[in-house]
Amino acid sequence: MQSIIKTHDLTKRYKDLLAVNHLDLEIEDGEIFGLLGPNGAGKTTTVLMLSTVIKPTDGTATIGGYDVRKNPDNVRRLIGICFQEPKLLWVSTPWDVLNWHAKVCGLSTEERRDRVKQVLEDVNMWEYRRKKVHGLSGGMRKRVEVAKVLIQRPKIAFIDEPTAQIDVIGKHKIWDMIRELREEGSTIILATNELYEADILSDRVGIMHKGGLLVCNTPKKLKDSIPGGDTVSIRLEKEVPSTVLKKLESMKDVADVVALKPNDLRVYLNRVEEIVPKMMELLLKNKLPIESIHMSEPSLDDVFVHYTGLTIEEADTKSITKPPK
């Protein structure tokens, strides 16, 4: 695929605070790219530079072939942005906000009416369409902010914390709409500190910490990069001989075998889907019937811990890269 976004040495400093640290990144046309990290990791600052809201201190980026420094107007014609904190007209209603946004995007009167109604229904805000924005809850205001991007259907959509303050049912609805937006041809940059959200939505994930990009790949490859990250728990009908344990330990991609009980094993390995059939073949060949087997793979939280030594929650509390307000 062709890259639609490229950054080179992209950097943002606030006095002695390095918010984004010499970022080199490529995002492919048509993908959902998850920018994952704790609060203060540099995700929002990166999004604001890519969307021309703030200027880089050093380096630059190209969006659809246009330089964010030299051709910001051309960049703005390609993009839409859902801000982390909703940017709404506080004297307006959701209907007014979205109708105005649709008008700015060039939709006709009929198109505006139909699309605004459809999107308000999709984000479960239709019955609140005439309610003053200042009277809405944080979650409702966030739904209206997300709806602005869904109204616009831009070539490139920057969506910062799309489901912050939104209930579980609403989250799933918005996730489906983000997928539909991509299916219609948009490239989506999803900045989030929600591990599950990044995992299920993203084609690739870039993990940021303290302003830098630690690692970037598909969620599966990131999980597979953890040595012995997959876990298999096996309960057998009888005790496992030491000779069989040694054979299990010597198998390719097996990092460790722990006998919790004589007939209860926990195996740490990589590429669980490839190795487990071979393990089962070995056990059955040695007349060791399997009572139960349970497989689990690492999460993106495990990936974050592997590369930083911290959980994402711990990194939240220790973050020092929050830009000044």
Image (cartoon, grey):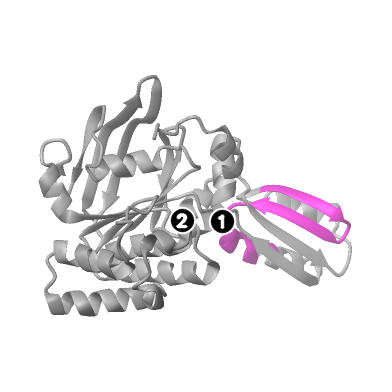
Residue 253 placed where, x, y %?
Answer: 60, 50
Q: Does the magenta stretch include residue 272?
A: yes
Earlier residue among tags 2 and 1: 2
What is the number of the mark on residue 308?
A: none
Taking 187 as reference, is 290 left or right? right
Residue 96 vs residue 257, the one in the foreground: 96
Residue 316 placed where, x, y %?
Answer: 55, 39
Instruction: Please report the residue visible at 39 percent of the width from the left and 72 percent of the height from the top.
Output: 123
Q: In this view, does 245 lie above or below 313?
A: below
Instruction: Please report the residue visible at 11 percent of the width from the left and 46 percent of the height from the top.
Output: 73
Q: In which quarter of the image is the C terminus?
A: top left
Circles 2, 1 touching at the beta carbon (< 8 Å): no
Question: Real-space Cα distance between discs 2 and 1?
Answer: 21 Å
Residue 223 placed where, x, y %?
Answer: 53, 51
Residue 38 placed where, x, y %?
Answer: 50, 42
Q: Which residue is labeled 1 in the image?
A: 271
